[in-house]
Amino acid sequence: MRIKKLVWVILFPLGIATGYTQEKDLVKYVNTLQGTDSEWALSYGNTYPTVGLPFAMHFFSAQTGKNGDGWKYTYKANTIRGFQQVHQCSPWMGDYAVFSLMPGKGNLIVNEDERALPFSHDNEIAKPHYYSVKFDNGIQAEISPVERGAHMRFSFPKKEKAYLVLDGFLKHSQVKIIPEERKIIGYVNNGRFVPENFRNYFVLVFNQDFKSYGTWENRANKISSGNRTDEGEGIGAYLEFKPGACVEVKMASSYIDPDQALRNLKQELDGDKNFETTKTKAFDVWNTWLNRIVVEGGTEEEKATFYSCLFRANLFSRKFYEIDPAGNPYYFSPYDGKIHPGYMYTDNGFWDTFRSQFPLSNILHREMQGRYMQSLLDAQQQAGFLPTWSNPGMSGVMIGNHAISLLTDAWVKGVRTFNSDSALHAYYHEVTNKGFYGGSNGRQGWEDYFIKGYIPYKDDLHESTAKTLEYAYDDFCAYQLAKMTGNKFYENIFARQMYNYVNVFDKDSKFMRGRLANGEWMPDFDPVEWGGAFTEANAWQYTWSVMHDINGLINLMGGVDRFNAKLDSLFTMEQTIKYGSYKQEIHEMREMRLAKMGQYAHGNQPVQHVAYLYNFSGQPWKSQERTRKVMSQLYNASEKGFPGDEDQGGMSSWYVLSALGIYSVCPGTDEYVFGSPVFEKATVKLENGKEFVVIAKNNSAENVYIQSAQLNGVPYDRNFIPYEDIINGGKLEFVMGASPNRNGGVSKEARPFSLSRLEGE
């Protein structure tokens, strides 16, 4: 009984036992090809057509690129070479635990280039619950997912031999063909950030007898006909079926052992009589999930953008746990290679997602967030450091110690499933040590940060000012958590460090700048020069990265008038770019140019909160205008749907929140700052059974300015809404107009949280 109950939880969003009545078909709006017209030099999302359930352990995708290519599916490609089990959260990180199936007819072809088949997007369907493509040669391939596997169907033309080729991808693999059971079992162990004993055990069960079979290896493409078992580098298998066959294959895999792989198959696919059953169930899961936010009004194109983004906002982080025979969760740890009880989540880079995805999940998925926060502390015990970008193990990619942002944001919002003292102790260890991996594992230069109050730029320590700014914000989060929980020791430690941003602000140029160990500024400063002391950005973009103390930044700039003038310039100035330490154009630079919004580079994270900052400086109508312009000009549901890397739901979550008219400028506080809602009405259905409704009367593409607001029928003149007023349900009602209301939201009381007071007030 316990297993059945847990499987029910798998099939429906956490905290929602029976779904909502009269659900609309919202899956129809989702285009999983959104963002796939990407390449190394230019990202419109760097996505692939994911077919998978929300936060599932495995996804699946068509494969146009070669094995190991981070751009596994590109819209411009005209051939497909396989259908992969995938986990990739970014093409820059690569994938792991990959294997693929590919159909063919006539002669057996295993070489990944030669087996690729031409197709047209006209014959392709790409939805969250279902992917289908009919190749030019008449073969049709279809996929529908479960959490730890998938159901595939391959329909072959008559009169020619029908083959399926299983590719073992990169590194070591094993296959065992069991014809009498219509089954293949085995494992793959590919991946960069995995323990030495990592294996992904798979089981594939077919609905047809095998006419012939064998193994092969993808280094020299040598075929061993009739061979049942093989093991080694790039080992795969092939199966022949009768001409005209309609072959269904149920598959599941496990990181624990072969028995658990079979258990996952039985738990999630045994009850599915055929492919259509799995497809219907997957549709129901996604439609229930998407119905958590029902929007009304707006155009069909805006709904397609919204629900395509809501889909991507609910893919990562990935569940890395499985269900044991007693119905309890347990997992193979990607950090220490051991089996542990409980929940584990992975595949997320917090530099990309702490700003938007986690504040959205704290509204929609509180139960999952509670499990997630504990899993962060478990990961720290297993790895020695908190995760920053897991894929699935520790990578240390990017900068910052942003796990503390997740933990504090959850705590502030009432998700208190973890021990706060343990979190603070883990964070203190993080910030007083340099870890084994990359720029975000511990702190490089932490001694200088504590003693000098900033990270100096050195030949062996780049991105120093970006790190100082992000560390100061992270230290604010630690201070906030310590203060809320009465931990005076850590409160006192971080009370000073959270103001370290001041030490990299140049009062003469009015920019954040790189600073040397002797206290001098880096020479030859140009605010449009990228890299050096900054990460994938320049001083124009990083100067605003003081999310916890915008008033302090306003004071440094000389008051609200100068602050607003500089903000205006960011969005309207020339798009001059100097390559700086990058020495060439990187894709973020090109994406900024294409956006045509001055030095505002929405395609990367450091600047994504900036359009909301007018709420702090007495001109909230400019935030309303800017955010609507970003949404309407830089997002759509097409293959060119994003203004840069989508980044594990980070870019999509920005859109979802902003389309509701709110955004968390400073995660770690309980405030969501106002922008301008896209739709006339949006109903957010919460796990506690309540509803939070946003109404925007007279809303249109022209009427982007808030004229007045009410919260639960009471006039409301703040530029933000507390989390409590969202999660307890209620109605936020705006009246919109075509002209700014320059008297609304301008009082001191209307402004969002900031550590400092504005000078002169």
Image (cartoon, rainbow, N blue to C red):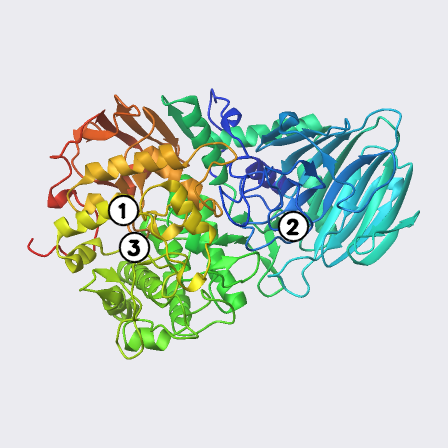
x and y, in percent, of residue 449 in the image: 32, 73
Up the image or down, 197 lies above or below 303; here it is below
Q: Is residue 220 left or right of residue 372?
A: right
Q: Amino acid at mark 3?
A: Trp
Badges 3 and 1: C-beta atoms under 8 Å apart? Answer: yes
Which mark lies nearer to you, 1 or 2? 1
Q: Tell me: residue 697, above or below residue 569.
A: above
Distance (Cα) linking label 3 and label 2: 52 Å
Instruction: Mark yes or no: residue 366 visible.
Output: no
Where residue 540 is drawn, which disc sits there? Answer: 3
Q: Mark 1 to mark 2: distance in Å?
A: 58 Å
Say which label, 3 or 1, has the lower sequence index: 3
Residue 102 x %, y %: 76, 40
Mark 3 and mark 2 lie on one chain; the one further toward the N terminus is 2
x and y percentages locating residue 34 in the rendered image:
52, 35
Say which quadrant the N terminus sits in.
top right
| Amino acid marked by disc 1 | Met
Query: How many numbered marks have been drawn onto this rendered protein structure?
Result: 3
Evaluate if marks 3 and 2 touch, with contact meaning CB atoms under 8 Å apart: no
The residue to which callout 2 is attached is 324
**Kind of element beneath mark 1:** loop
